[in-house]
Amino acid sequence: MTNTLHRYGKAAGFEDDYILFAIPCKGKNDEEAVKRLKEFLEICARHHPVNMGNSTSGAYRPSQELHPTIHWSRNTKADYNGVIAAVEKIGTVAAVFSTRKKAEECLADLIEADLGLSINMSTSVEGAHRAAENCGIHRHSVEYSLGFLDPHDHLPNSQVLELSTMCGHGMVSFNLARKMLDMVREGRRTTDQAVATLARFCPCGVYNPERAKRLLEESRKRQA
Amino acid sequence: MGAIYVDSSVNRAKINLDECVECGACSRMSNETLNPHLVRSVRSLAKIFRFRFEPEPDVCPTSAFVIDDLPYPRIVRRIFSDPLIEHTSTGIKGRGTEEVKTNDVAHRVSVGEVGYVIEFGRPGVGVRFHHIQTMTMALAKLGVHFEGKNPITHLMVDRSRGTLKEDLLHEKILSAIVELKTTTEEVPAILETVEKVSKTIDTVVALGVSTRCDQTGNDPVLAPLLDDLGYDSERAKTNLGLGRVTNTRNGEGNISDEHSASVR
């Protein structure tokens, strides 16, 4: 699962995108891992993440049997407690931070907690290296994204790619990203409403609403 | 994918089943449970007056999407496309394995080795298995070792040739990952092959390469090599080395790792 590796953008564009995730290894440290996965998320929640997920649902979730008034009064807030409570099976859990400071403070607490789970950081190469150094640990392994090979020009423009690739499983379609860009540019939705819509499609909870908000704002201002 | 379209001859939304990869995103969207006749009547009335209601874009007013029970081989589309479905071959949700995310306890990629994560169809384009086979056959000619726990490797009928099950070749999926491991010396040949073959298959390829850092947390080998080969690695997934073996049931202690760095 490389659902956070191939976010489109330059390293400088990941200044507001730090993902910490924990994963148990089958047969090595998965006994009673659910409790430790919950503990991981509880620690993350104390450091003001912008999204969290438990590989089944994120802090922004779709709803069933909505009332028609929802079209005028939609909740755009994240629900972190719901994510923690819903961890029932062993899997990957993640938290997204919008600053390196918050990510580092969270990482320091995770080191202290010594959960025994593998903990990874997904961001720019340099960003993760510096965060590890500042917390007094050394990187164990690193997986580099070498980007996309698209010789047949299937991919859309960079604005759409930056928004849609924040769900690495491809649940935020190019068309939805385009639609949200248009709706924000034309003043038909606020950026908060648009990013909540985008984030609801990412069941892993690794979509970064703060980065999406910045990208949508930049797009709106560029057009003005 | 563009699988959902409006068929103007019947004025209804339909799903192009050949293009649909069974990712389940449509069925997970928010729902109202309004009567379809009422919804169509309101829309028809609004159309007459050139009035356009702009509802929430992620709400289906009639809960119209229903997930079908799928027979083989179509079920494979869902297994590879829906992130909430667990691969029985790996025991984890998603299209790949734990890669280097658990390398601190699994030691999958060691010093002097390079792991590759070659992902097809992503982002947002999709891929058919025969495109993946074109790549795996080209890589097999280089004598690579395909990761045994990877779902694509499980679908191979002949790993030495990189051939996949024939009845799957025309199935379309959202994405799939081929994983392999080589020595550092083989990196240029592998990347050259992947680039060359990607030009012949009608999809996109996302490429990731991984390695083990040294005792000081640095990567003095792969990063400079990628730089020399002209690759920009802006982003990475970094294993912070905090994992350890904690299971007691099988009596395993902490596996010693001669390259392991101290936590503090």
Image: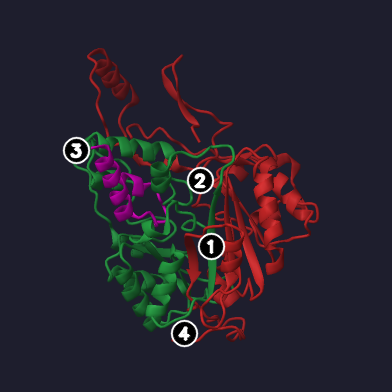
Chain colours: A green, B red
Task: Check if mark 1's residue and mark 3's residue have beta carbons within 8 Å.
Answer: no
Residue at 46% from the left image edge and 26% from the top image edge: B5
**SS class, disc 3:** loop
Circle 1: element type: strand
Q: Mark 2, residues whose alpha carbon is within 10 Å: few (<14), some, or many (≥20)?
A: many
Return the mark for residue A72. 3
Closer to the chain start, of discs 4 and 2, is: 2
The reply to whether the C-beta atoms of the residues labelled 3 and 2 are less than 8 Å apart is: no
Nearer mark to the viewer, of 1 and 3: 1
C-beta proximity under 8 Å, tags 4 and 3: no
- Dividing the picture into quadrants, the one containing residue A38 is bottom left
Of circles 3 and 2, the one toward us is 2
> Label 4 crowding class (10 Å Cα cut-off): few <14, some 14-19, many 20+?
some
Residue B38 magenta-drawn? Answer: no
Task: Tell which circle, 1 or 3, labels the residue nearer the N-terminal end.
Answer: 3
* Disc assigned to residue B263: 4
Disc marking residue A10: none
User: Can you give x and y, in whole percent of width and height, for residue A184 in the image?
Assistant: 26, 39
Q: Which residues are magenta?
A: A197-224
